[in-house]
Image (tube, rainbow, N blue to C red):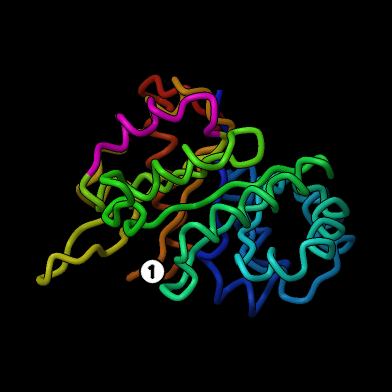
């Protein structure tokens, strides 16, 4: 049964202003785990002690690609100390998208993490679906090129949808290599660009995605909202309420 987490980027401003208080609110809302994007200068021991107190698991951390290339030993030490298993490449700038070099580096980083007992994942946006290599989406070429032994999938299902593909199909395609998904909803502005909204407020078929993720054996379904029109704490409360309603209707998630 999949557990429910929150990507803390959603409440980044609140976390920066009140790290402990924001995590307490996240735990009180019923999220079981959190995915960090930064630790705001806290030591691994400070973070672990607070999470243990709140009963929150650290389900993963987004770590900048160049940081993993240049300072991998430091990241390994920190994440082993904080109790985090999954290190996730969150985004590549246009300048970083030298794909042959990226694939080589992901293989090297993933191998080093595996030797340390950790796991490398990659988190997609839409460009990995819309940009092609050899007639295939970069998303697929990446995972064909880099072995599953050293690179797992953190699928942002909303960006798969926005990229023009069926998230349910993509989840099925990567079953067995997919420990984490991001569950995110979106609408579109007048220009047709994605606008992230609370779960259940947009166009994404969330129930079908969650069903597929559970069927694929994911460990974590992670709520994320890149930008919130409403106060972020209110937004994450609305989203976990959707999750609870989904569970009440038979969804196989822990809430």
In the picture provided, is 135 more to the left or to the right than 230? left
**Residue at image point 31% right, 31% down:** 168
Pinpoint residue 35: horizontal percent, then vertical percent: 62, 53
Residue 100 or residue 234, whichever sits in front: 100
> Which corner quadrant holds the N terminus?
top right
Total labels: the figure holds 1
> Which corner quadrant holds the C terminus?
top right
Q: Does the segment drawn in magenta span residue 175?
A: yes
**Residue at image point 45% right, 66% down:** 97
| Outermost residue toward the left in this view | 190
The span picked out in magenta is 165-178
Splitting the image into 4 quarters, where does residue 95 fall?
A: bottom left
**Residue at image point 69% right, 51% down:** 108
- Residue 254 seen in render: yes
Q: Dot 1: within a 10 Å radius of its alpha carbon, few (fewer than 14), some, or many (20 or more) residues?
A: some
Residue 145 or residue 41, whichever sits in front: 145
**Residue at image point 73% right, 67% down:** 20
Pinpoint residue 170: horizontal percent, then vertical percent: 35, 34
Please say if 195 is above or below 154.
Answer: below
Pinpoint residue 248: horizontal percent, then vertical percent: 41, 25
- Residue 185 seen in render: no
In the picture provided, is 12 more to the left or to the right than 132? right
Please say if 214 is above or below 26.
Answer: above
Q: Does the segment drawn in magenta span residue 104?
A: no
Residue marked by disc 1: 227
């Amino acid at each position: 049964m999949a557990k429910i987490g929150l990507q803390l980027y959603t409440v980044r401003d609140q976390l920066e202003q009140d790290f402990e208080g924001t995590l307490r609110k996240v735990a009180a809302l019923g999220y079981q785990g959190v995915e960090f994007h930064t630790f705001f200068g806290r030591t691994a021991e400070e973070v672990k002690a607070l999470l243990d107190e709140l009963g929150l698991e650290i389900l993963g951390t987004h770590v900048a690609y160049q940081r993993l290339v240049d300072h991998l030993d430091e990241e390994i030490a920190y994440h082993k100390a904080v109790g985090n298993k999954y290190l996730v490449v969150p985004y590549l700038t246009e300048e970083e998208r030298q794909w042959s070099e990226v694939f080589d580096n992901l293989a090297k980083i993933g191998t080093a993490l595996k030797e340390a007992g950790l796991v490398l994942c990659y988190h997609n946006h839409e460009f990995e679906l819309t940009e092609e290599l050899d007639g295939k989406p970069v998303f697929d070429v990446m995972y064909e090129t880099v072995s599953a032994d050293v690179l797992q999938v953190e699928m942002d299902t909303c960006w798969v949808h926005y990229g023009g593909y069926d998230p349910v199909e993509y989840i099925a395609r990567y079953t067995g290599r997919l420990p984490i998904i991001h569950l995110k909803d979106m609408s579109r502005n007048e220009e047709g660009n994605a606008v992230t909204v609370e779960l259940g407020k947009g166009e994404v078929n969330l129930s079908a995605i969650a069903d597929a993720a559970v069927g694929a054996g994911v460990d974590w379904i992670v709520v994320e909202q890149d930008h919130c029109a409403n106060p972020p704490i209110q937004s994450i409360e609305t989203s976990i309420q959707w999750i609870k309603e989904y569970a009440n209707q038979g969804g196989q998630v822990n809430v």
